[in-house]
Amino acid sequence: MSAKNIYKYPLHDEDDYKGRIRFTLFAEKYFNTGLNDILSDKKSDIRSLKEKRQELLNQAKAEAKENEGGAGKATESTMKELEEVQAQLEELAKDVGSFNGLNNETEMGMRPRQIVDTEVLLYLPQGLQFRDNVTYENIDVGASGAAVAGGASAIASMADGVGSFVQGLTGGSANDGLAKLATVRLSQAAGKFSDEVTAGLKLQTGVTTNPNTRSLFKQVNMREFQFNFKMIARSAAESQQVKEIVNFFRSELYPEDIPVTIGGQEISLGYNFPNKFNIEFEYDGKTIAHKVKPCFLRSVDTTYNASQMAFHEDGEFLEVDMNLNFTETVTLSKKDILETDADGVGY
């Protein structure tokens, strides 16, 4: 399916340089619920409760008729359940009244969102960079943790650690360093002065505990992409195209308001998510480099006439530098890298 709106730079001499970067804009249809859905649910609950109330009323009449020859009363359990249903009905009626009033006073809910069919074709910029990165964190596992990491069982390591500590503390160890460490470790339980006492003992004994620091994998980080374009228009048509490209990216950076009209005045209560971009790298129509997951546009930096103050006859800037920063919306795994398409290209 061809795009309805296509912006391109450069417009001329496209066969001279076949490297292209393609930005395809699309909007997702998010789950949408508004006041009408809430009102519908509450009205349905009211109907169900009214039916339940009628059943209980009929039951109460039948019980009263059976008791004392028709002059009696319904059972206490039936009357209690009837009171509870009536209370729920009154509460729901208040809610519906409030929602109806709000619905008449305001215009709320998500604006209709349409799939956007727009593409921007720009030249493949110099210095195309992909940065794959993950995060590790450092953690002190201690002596027992180090033993477990080395393959020992957890229980055996803990028991061995306690035994070594007690042996060193009682002086039953031939290892003078272990006895000193036992003293240092004991000092850590010296209440609010533990830090000062421990530091003093370390200075006196000349030993310190080994925290056995290890690196642990924490998470995969989002990839980010930066593209720098210099656009120098060589015609009025190309100048207009550059202007539209800049305005397009700037407008798609920002979200749409979720408006509410109160007392004839419109204010914004929130935002719809901005649209996403698919980014593809091509040479002579063939996908190259790596694929990219859908991205959000994070920033647009525009500089006019960075190297010279020159204008076209219509007053448009001769030179426009545009820097775009994107972030992928999902993280990658090894599977994404190893699985490639027909051209041998993966993420």
Image (spheres, grey):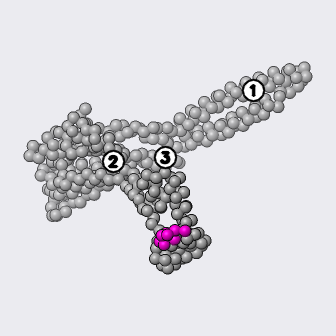
The residue drawn where x is 48% and y is 41% is 109
Q: Nearer the viewer, residue 234 or 14?
A: 14
**Residue 221 in picture, x, y percent from top left:** 36, 52
Residue topped by disc 3: 260
Q: Amino acid at mark 3?
A: Val
The answer for how far apart the CA atoms under marks 2 and 1 are is: 58 Å
Number of numbered labels in the structure image: 3
Find the magenta span and give its range. 172-179
The residue drawn where x is 25% and y is 38% is 340
Quadrant containing the N terminus in the rendered view: top left
Residue topped by disc 2: 328
Which is closer to the viewer, label 3 or label 2? 2
The residue drawn where x is 45% and y is 56% is 147
- Residue 342 found in image quarter: top left
The residue drawn where x is 80% and y is 25% is 60
Q: Amino acid at mark 2?
A: Glu
Residue topped by disc 1: 56
Left/right placement of residue 68 relative to residue 34 reads right
Which is closer to the viewer, label 2 or label 1? 2
